[in-house]
Image (cartoon, rainbow, N blue to C red):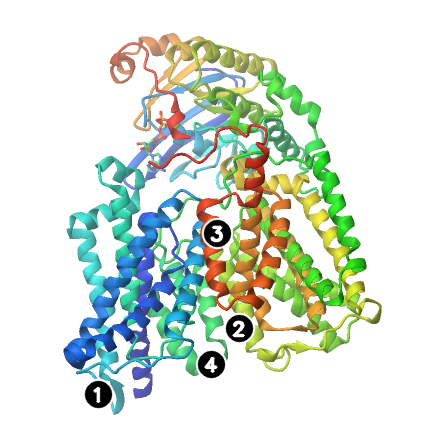
Amino acid sequence: MSCSLLPPVLEARALRKSYGGVVAVAGLSLSVPRGQILALIGPNGAGKSTTFNLLTGHLSPDSGDVLLNGQSLAGLPPRRIWRMGVGRTFQVAATFGSMTVLENIQMGLISAHNRYRALWPWAGALYRDQAMALLDLVGLGPLGPLPCATLAYGDVKRLELALALVNDPHVLLMDEPTAGMALAERESVMELTVTLARQRTITVVFTEHDMDVVFRHADRVAVINRGTLLADGTPDEVQQNEQVRDVYLGRGATYRKQAPDAER
Amino acid sequence: MDFLLVQALNGLASASSLFLVASGLSLIFGVTRIVNFAHGAFYMLGAYGAYSLYRLLLPLLGTGWGFWLALPLTALAVAAVAALVEILILRRLYDAPELLQLLATFGLTLITEDLVLMVWGAEDLLGPRAPGLKGAVSILGQKFPLYDLALLAVGPVVWLALRWWLTRTRWGLLVRAATQDRAMVAALGVNQAWLFTGVFALGVFLAALGGAIQLPRDAIHHGMGLQVIVAVFVVVVIGGLGSISGALLASVLIAELNAFGILLFPRITLVLMFLVMAAVLIVRPSGLLGKPQAPAQAVSPSRPWQPWQPPVRWLLLAAVGLAASAPLWLGDYRLSVASEILIFMLFAASLHLMMGVGGLISFGHAAFFGLGAYGAALSVHWLQAPMGLALLNGPLLAIAGAILLGGFCLRLSGVYLAMLTLAFAQIVWSVLFQGGEWSGGDNGLLGIWPQAWAASPAAFYGLTLAVVVLAILLIRRLSLSPFGYAVRGCRDNPLRAEAIGLPRGPLHWACMVFAGAFAGLAGALYAFLKGSVFPDSVAIPLSVDGLVMVMLGGVQSLTGPVLGALVYKGLSMSLISAVEYWRLILGGLIVVLATALPQGLSGVIDLVRRAPPTGPSTEEPRP
Ligand SMILES: Nc1ncnc2c1ncn2[C@@H]1O[C@H](COP(=O)(O)OP(=O)(O)OP(=O)(O)O)[C@@H](O)[C@H]1O
Ligand SMILES: [Mg+2]
């Protein structure tokens, strides 16, 4: 799959980013063909989140470029990139705390329909059914009227997934979508993501610390370490790779990060 | 030429004092993340304290020792008071939203002002000349006071001492670590509480010393605290909050600007200072040497907004009905009091739109109120506009102001925004105050009376009630519209807002313009209610009144501020007439509110009502 002939939807070219002295991403190139589900893995601090933020315009690279369908995204703010059909979730889930679960989605839909400038309608009455449908899709149906703050962390992650879907993205970037979830829930969320991706031909890039999840659901796995690409191939190829075993898998059985509740 | 040199030296001498206060403020902010509004009050205490201590020591030690000991001893004593204040009050506020911290320390300022009035009286006091440094030296034929020459050295010496302390001592190292990363200090196993107390006391020591060394130069008076804090805010904002070297650079810049501004543009020195600040903020939003701050929040987004439930709806309807019947059972005087309260309800509601919905802290909301009042008054005075048109022109002028201010503020948030709004209000104030004939200057504009049909107190009350109720309903509609949601989304989570296509800057700008328009409408009504306008309607106290109303009611909902305005305005109008030391009471009220009742009155109502589960509080226990 990694040497697909399809033209890439998303392409990173020699991306570099450093924070002061720390080089977080050191010349990373990646190209993701349409509809592929790519797992970006690597140890803590490898530069995964930084790469995500470079792809979505939340950070601007020191050098290098990001292309979406062959078009450069350099200098575009995240909101423009989003309007070009790139949805994302964050490692530390980002939702609107003063709104209910349902209103969060409504907010997204209002923006997706470009109606956030409207002064007169009641926002709470707009796109209700669509919002409910999205909540049902991610399994949050009954939780609509609850304040965001009361959700369990796993449910917040689901809410973020729903938020990322409001404008029917054709690229979905998910930073640790299953962090803080129990094993069964991880499976079901990834299952859902994969099903959606196949149905709607969404190109998905996700990071994940649970190798079982990665190898079961990804079409392709890219391993980065210290900001550079260490290996890139099918799950089988990557699992066989000596170097990857050394720096990453060799440390023990499946490496699992603790639920990042503490980061909230 | 020689004259210019002396003027420059003069500027540098003033810079020293400014630097002492500013570096203290910066130090405290760096470690505790609190912008200490009360810093000016401690500066003032330093001056008054030194004055009294000197007179106490004089018979015992004589002039020489008496004077030179009084300065540091006073600063130490004030620092001890500050440590107590930190332990009793500020400790409760470290994790509170910035708005509460600013307000609580402002409350301390009010309290101090009245205490100073009580102890030292209202008259200006003249301090002694500095023993041993009474004469003057001749510089290029110009006389320059010896004491000022000595002051020149104080700034750089303190700067060097602070740098040495910060880089070479264990405590200094801890302070620097805490400035960079608070969590790290906790990890180092240091007693954080005492570190904070120590830093606060040190910062206040510098401020009090800054006040004490002014003693031989200037008369001291009870307004000097507020005066210096505005200048110091400008200094730390220009230099960069938390940066000591930035404070030195900026205090020299501002002091020189003042020294020469007085010569070149005596009427607009204040404006000049703020223009420089605005220019710096536009180019470097974190000041010359400051580091970018994480975006701060005025409100902790803890629970969803609830639409008015049927019982609340009926209650509000009944309240409006009752208010409408007031002309039947209230006399003329009370009716105009009621009109004033209504006007401030609108003012508070407009501030809520900006702070509660937009999360934009404003310490200069009176600017819009004042622009509205002057917009109406100027069109009546100069254009003989009818009342209807004037009531429209007021908000229009406020909108123009908001568009201007919003343009400058697009990239700012948190305390920087609060300070820029404060600065903007001061600019508007000084333009109006020094405006001469067209604005009436200090004397204001008189004879702004409503037209005949609305001239009676009852009729004007009716008009006010109608306009205010309508405007508040509009504000509510706006906050619950897609636009209001989008603005609130940007407040709740800028990251997510940007990631779903919401442009934060323009949305906040628009929010500020709407808030300005409604505040301007309130101001225009106020002009007609009073029949006159004065620069006071733009001054800091009015901005703070607005903040207290919003806080008192609770910033989480629109009903809160409106209720807060009712209670606060009613209370303060009766207090001012009945009590001599109203600032003491008001200040105390603010401090108690900020520390004990962060959610305001609506928070209390929630507690009593045992509202539906609102989920785990977002306020985490202090580490
Ligand atoms: N804002 C920042 N300032 C300074 N350094 C940073 C910043 N963000 C990340 N870094 C550093 O950049 C490197 C890459 O971080 P990044 O967050 O991209 O890693 P990651 O692969 O997402 O790790 P994790 O699995 O922990 O999420 C790390 O060394 C990190 O310490
Ligand atoms: Mg990460």
**C-alpha separation, residue under disc 2 versus residue under disc 3:** 24 Å
Question: Which amino acid type is shown beneath numbered disc 3?
Answer: Leu
**Residues beneath discs 2 and 3 located on the same chain:** yes
Label 3 resides on the chain identified as B
Percent from the top left, x then y, of residue B594? 46, 49
Instruction: Name which residue lies at 19% across and 49% down.
Output: B171
Which of marks 4 and 2 precedes in the sequence?
4
Which of marks 1 and 3 precedes in the sequence?
1
What secondary structure is marked by label 3? loop
As drawn, the residue found furthest toward the right would be B453
Label 2 resides on the chain identified as B
Q: Which residue is mark 4?
A: B266
Q: Which mark is residue B215?
A: none
Left or right of A252 in this view: B380: right
Q: Quadrant of residue B622?
A: top left
Q: Quadrant of residue B572?
A: bottom right
Left or right of B448 in this view: B218: left
Which of marks 3 and 2 precedes in the sequence?
3
Question: Which amino acid type is shown beneath numbered disc 4?
Answer: Pro
What secondary structure is marked by label 1? loop
Residue A245 visible somewhere in the drawing: yes
The mark closer to the camera, 3 or 1, is 1
Question: Which amino acid type is shown beneath numbered disc 1?
Answer: Gly
